[in-house]
Image (cartoon, grey):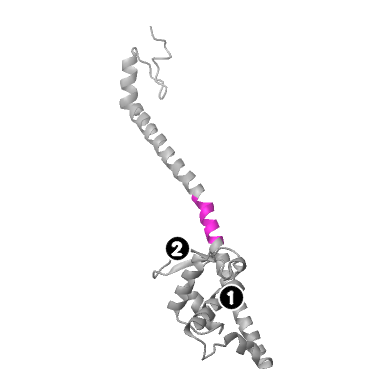
């Protein structure tokens, strides 16, 4: 036999003689069943929200790190550009004080054979990479390297296509390695180490 407490409505205190009567009263008068279903839905929603919050907690530090790296790369690019400009100014002064310095570096004899001129260009590309390994450490394309050499007036003048051919040769020698295809279809290269031991 149910106790008196079991027959009393916990919401309003009304007494009932049967459990069924109490149940019908709570459903119709207080919406007990509906409240239970809502509680279940709320619990499921809470789980979804909790999962999403945990995912945001995972993503946030990665985004912050990405922004930090991008900002650092921007600073390094600016520093590299400033250093190249300073070096160019110094070389201009050296060329006036000691003309043989610029003449020896840019010299390409008109009476040498095609093979010798090609080797001179290839060595200039290799030398430029070795001298600028820090500013090139993040990667570069043959076109970018060709532009930098022209800006610095380094070595004999050559086309971007010729620079690309030399980069492929340096890749086969282990001086650089192919990293990835960049926008526009060019190959980005990375320096793999000091290439002095592999000099031909």
Callout 2: helix, strand or loop?
strand
Name the spot of residue 145 as percent of width and height, x first. 51, 75
Q: Residue at x 61, y 66 (%)?
A: 197
In the rendered structure, the answer to whether residue 195 lies left or right of residue 144 reads: right
Whether 35 is drawn above or below 144: the answer is above
Name the spot of residue 72 as percent of width and height, x first. 58, 65
Which one is nearer the viewer's eye here, 130 or 93?
Answer: 130
Q: Which image quarter: residue 24?
A: top left
Magenta extent: 59-68
Q: Which image quarter: residue 107?
A: bottom right
| Residue corresponding to mark 1 | 127
Q: Residue furthest right?
A: 97
- Mark carried by residue 141: none
- For the C terminus, the image quarter is bottom right
Callout 1: helix, strand or loop?
helix
Name the spot of residue 174 as percent of width and height, x first. 53, 64
Mark 1 is surrounded, within 10 Å at the Cα level, by few (under 14), some (14 to 19) or many (20 or more) other residues, namely some
* Most common secondary structure along the magenta stretch: helix
Name the spot of residue 89 as percent of width and height, x first. 63, 86
Closer to the chain start, of discs 1 and 2, is 1
| Residue corresponding to mark 2 | 180
Q: Is residue 140 visible?
A: no
In the rendered structure, the answer to whether residue 23 lies left or right of residue 165 reads: left
Which one is nearer the viewer's eye here, 69 or 152?
Answer: 152
User: Which of pointers 1 and 2 indicates the residue nearer the eye?
Assistant: 1
Q: Residue at x 58, y 75 (%)?
A: 127
Which one is nearer the viewer's eye here, 188 or 9?
Answer: 188
């Amino acid at each position: 036999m149910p106790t008196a407490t079991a027959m009393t409505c916990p919401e309003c205190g009304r007494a009932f003689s049967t459990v069924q009567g109490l149940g019908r009263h709570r459903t119709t008068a207080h919406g007990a069943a509906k409240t239970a279903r809502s509680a279940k839905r709320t619990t499921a929603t809470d789980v979804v929200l909790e999962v999403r919050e945990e995912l945001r907690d995972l993503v946030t530090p990665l985004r912050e790190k990405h922004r930090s790296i991008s900002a650092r790369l921007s600073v390094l690019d600016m520093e590299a550009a400033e250093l190249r400009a300073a070096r160019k100014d110094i070389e201009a002064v050296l060329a006036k004080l000691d003309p043989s310095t610029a003449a020896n570096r840019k010299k390409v004899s008109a009476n040498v054979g095609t093979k010798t001129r090609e080797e001179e260009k290839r060595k200039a590309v290799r030398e430029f990479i070795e001298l600028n390994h820090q500013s090139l450490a993040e990667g570069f394309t043959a076109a970018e390297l060709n532009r930098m050499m022209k800006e610095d007036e380094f070595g004999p003048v050559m086309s971007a296509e010729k620079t690309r051919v030399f980069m492929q040769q340096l890749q086969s020698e282990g001086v650089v390695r192919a990293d990835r295809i960049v926008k526009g279809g060019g190959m980005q290269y990375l320096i793999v180490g000091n290439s002095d031991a592999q000099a031909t």
